[in-house]
Amino acid sequence: MGCGSPSSDITDNSIIYERSMELEYAENYSVDYYEGGYKLLKIKDGTEILLVPEKAEIPSGLSEDVIVLRRPVKDLYLVSSSVMDMFAKLDALDTIRLSGQKSENWYIDEAREYMERGDILYAGKYNRPDYELIVSEGCSLVIENTMILHSPEVLENLKSFDIPSMIEYSSYETHPLGRVEWVKFFGALTDREEEAEKLFREQAKILEEVSSYEKTDLTVAFFYITSNGMVQIRRSSDYVPKMIELAGGSYLPVYDGEEESARTTMNMQVEEFYAGAKDADFIIYNSSVDGGVTSIEEIIEKCPVLEDFKAVKNGDVWCTTNDMYQQSMSIGYMIADIHNMLHRDTKKEMRYLIHLR
């Protein structure tokens, strides 16, 4: 898998292609290796990043669109919050100088500690970056997520300051482990390929263990109540419904009106949600959006009709921990949690799901 093919045509053949990184699930990037320690990272949108050894020559004949970075890479501006967990697990936080989140917004302890010490500085949100700080700190590369596509002027401004940027498309991966496999991309970027492979393999092994069980007939609704009283659910193409399926369950509600959309969530009226999910065997409230709930009563206060749900009557009500979305390297553990919930295995430790009473 991965995008594209070996790019021996990026130069005048002054560097020689050796091999490509093997990918199992990720489809939106590729990594090619060349003699002499050169690496070419390619992303689905056409972005190409050439990593050049510290004392090696920059190949001639490069397209002006190729981003050239010297190894070892440093002074990154990490805007995509889901990627911070990968850098932390890779022990690569020292390559980051700037963050798109303030220290108090990180659930990742190591990232918060780096910012509190001043080793990583806050440089503004994705749509309002501090250009003066970014330039003064010698930023080598900005790592965005797809939210930046709503603010294209930011990319243009960064370009005008000669600051290269890339977009990570882990959220576009069709398989949950495709998201996890982006750790190999950042492992290549930071010269930590072995560590990345080990981290990915740990999560893949968990899925293998869970997949050895027969699929259940149990259904799961995953949602949260918005501030205006709507119910936000995940589209069936999103990774959360796919995690539920991989864990052995089935996602509700089945919504026949899904149109093609890049959005992974959708809002629906309470009555519509009730009709599609009232008979779900389990419900999971998404606490990572609104700060969470601590009891079934709190959920019913947010949405009184939930009192009639089968799962509420049976006490099969769960919520996520607040840090779920920042823990991108724990998708295997999340799938295992859902699996244990479906099997009502109370002896297993839950990492990201909490049983509400």
Image (spheres, rainbow, N blue to C red):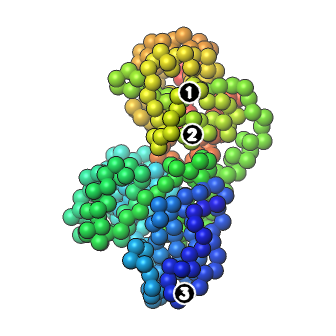
**What is the distance, in whole Å, between disc 2 and disc 1 at their CAs?**
11 Å
Distance Cα–Cα, label 3 vs label 2: 41 Å
Residue 161 placement: quadrant: bottom left
Q: Residue at x 50, y 49 (%)?
A: 171
Answer whether residue 346 is visible to the viewer in this image. Answer: no
Asked if residue 38 is positioned above or below residue 228 in the image, the reply reads below
Q: Circle 1 sits in a helix, a strand or a loop, which is it?
A: loop
* Crowd around label 3: few <14 · some 14–19 · many ≥20 (10 Å): few
- The quarter of the picture where residue 181 lies is bottom right
What type is the residue that disc 3 sits on?
Asn
Label 1, residues with CA under 10 Å away: few <14, some 14-19, many ≥20: few
Q: Earlier in the sequence, mark 3 or mark 2?
A: 3
Callout 2 crowding tier (Cα within 10 Å): few <14, some 14–19, many ≥20: some
Asked whether disc 2 touches disc 1, contact meaning CB atoms under 8 Å apart, the reply is no
> Which residue is identified by label 1?
255
Taking the spot 29% from the left edge, 62% from the top edge, the residue there is 156
Question: At label 1, which amino acid type do we have?
Answer: Tyr
Q: In the rendered structure, find residue 180 and report the number of the disc placed on it.
A: none
Q: Earlier in the sequence, mark 2 or mark 1?
A: 2
Disc 2 is placed on an element classified as loop
Say above or below: 225 vs 83.
above
* SS label for mark 3: loop
Q: Which mark is residue 13?
A: 3
Q: Determine whether label 3 and label 2 are within 8 Å by CB.
A: no
Q: Position of residue 201 (x, y in %)?
A: 66, 57
Give the residue type at disc 2: Ser
Task: Tell me which residue sits at (26%, 52%) in the image.
Answer: 128
Q: Is residue 164 left or right of residue 339?
A: left
Which residue appears farthest toward the left when viewing the image?
132
Q: Residue at x 69, y 46 (%)?
A: 207
Residue that carries the numbered disc 2 in the rendered image: 237
